[in-house]
Amino acid sequence: MQLTHSLLSGVFIYLMTAPLACGQSLPDGGAPREGLVAVGTQPAQRPKLSPGAEEIARTIDVVPLIERFYGLPERDRGAGVGVMSMEAMSLRQQITESVVSAGLEVDGLITEIDSELAEISVVRAQLEDRRDRALAIGNLATIVAGGATGVVGTAMQFSDGTSKAGNIIGVAGGAVSTVLSLIGLRQQRGGKLPLGVAPNMLAKLFDLAPEFHSDYPKEVWTYLNDAPPTEPGSRTRRERLIKQWTDTGRLEPGATPKGRHKIELLTSSASDQRPLTMDLLNDRAAMLADLRAMVGLMKRDLSKLVLALRS
C-alpha cells in the first residue's frame, strides 16, 4: 500500500512539472525557433551619402562594391562584436584601396602643379632682379644726365656769349631725361624668359598636348569634367575654371587670334621654350593655384565617403 502511494505521488509530480518544462523550451509563449536563426541575417540599409560623397563614389567606381557590402547580413559584416566574413573583408579592402588610390592620384597631380609653380617662381625672381637692376641704373643715369646738363646749362646762362649754347644744353638734357624715363617704363615689364624643365598642367584643360608628367589621372579628369552636384547650373568644374579666368581678365573673351596666342603661352611646354613676360607668369601662376584648389576638393569628398561608410 505504501509502495502504491509512492508510485502515485511520483506520477502526479511528473504530470505537474512536465508542462512547465515544455513551456520553458519555447521562447515567448511558443514562438518558432526559426525566429532566432533570422536574427542578424537581414541585410542593412546602405548609409546615406552626401552629394559630394555620392559623386566621388561613382567617379572612382565603388558604388557596386558598396551595394554588395551592405547587401551582406550584419553578422557577415562584423556588426557589433562579430567577426567579418571573408567576402565582407574582401569588399571592404577593395573599397579602401580605391579610395586610397584616388587620394594618391590627387596628391601626385597637386605635386606636379607645385613643381610648375616652383619653376615659375624661379623664373619670375630672375626677371624681377633683372628689372630692378635695370631700373636702378636707369634712375641713376636720369639723375646724372638731368643734373649735369642742368648745372652746365644754368652756368652758361651767366654770359651773353654762352647763353644760347646753355639753352641748347638744357634742352638736350631734358630730352635725355625724357628718353631715359621712357626706357625705365619699358624696363618695368622685366623682359622675357622661358620656363625651364616644368610641366604644363594647364594644357589639357584647353585640349592641348600635355608634356612632362602633365597628363591627368582618369579619376581626376572625370571629376573635373563633372558638374558640382551642390552648385546651380550645368557647367562642369573645368568650364567654371575657364569662365572664372575669362571674367578676371586672365584669358581673352572669345576665340580670337590674340586669345589663342595667349593660351599657347600660358600652356607652353619645356620643348617649346617660349619666352614669357612677368605678366604671363603671374597669370599662369594664378590659374595653376585655382586648378590646385579645385582638384584638392576631390580629397574632401573622398574623406566624406570614408566617414559615411564608417558610421
Image (cartoon, grey):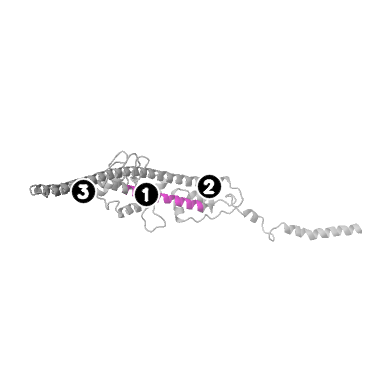
Amino acid type, callout 3: Ser
Q: Is residue 300 magenta?
A: yes
Question: Which residue is at the front of the view, 240 or 147?
Answer: 147
Closer to the chain start, of discs 2 and 1, is 2
User: Callout 2: few (<14), some (14-19), or many (20+) C-alpha neighbours within 10 Å?
Assistant: some
In the image, taking residue 224 as reference, residue 163 lies left or right, namely left
Q: Position of residue 192 (x, y in %)?
A: 27, 43
Q: Would you place residue 173 above or below residue 35 in this image?
A: above
| Residue on which the image places disc 3 | 181
Q: Amino acid at mark 1?
A: Ala
Specify the quadrant of the image occupied by residue 274. top left
Q: Is residue 179 visible?
A: no
- Please give the range of residues in magenta: 283-307
Secondary structure beneath disc 1? helix
- Label 2, label 1: how far apart the Cα atoms are: 35 Å
- Callout 1: 10 Å neighbours few (<14), some, many (20+)? some
The residue most toward the left is 161
For marks 3 and 1, the one nearer the N-term is 3
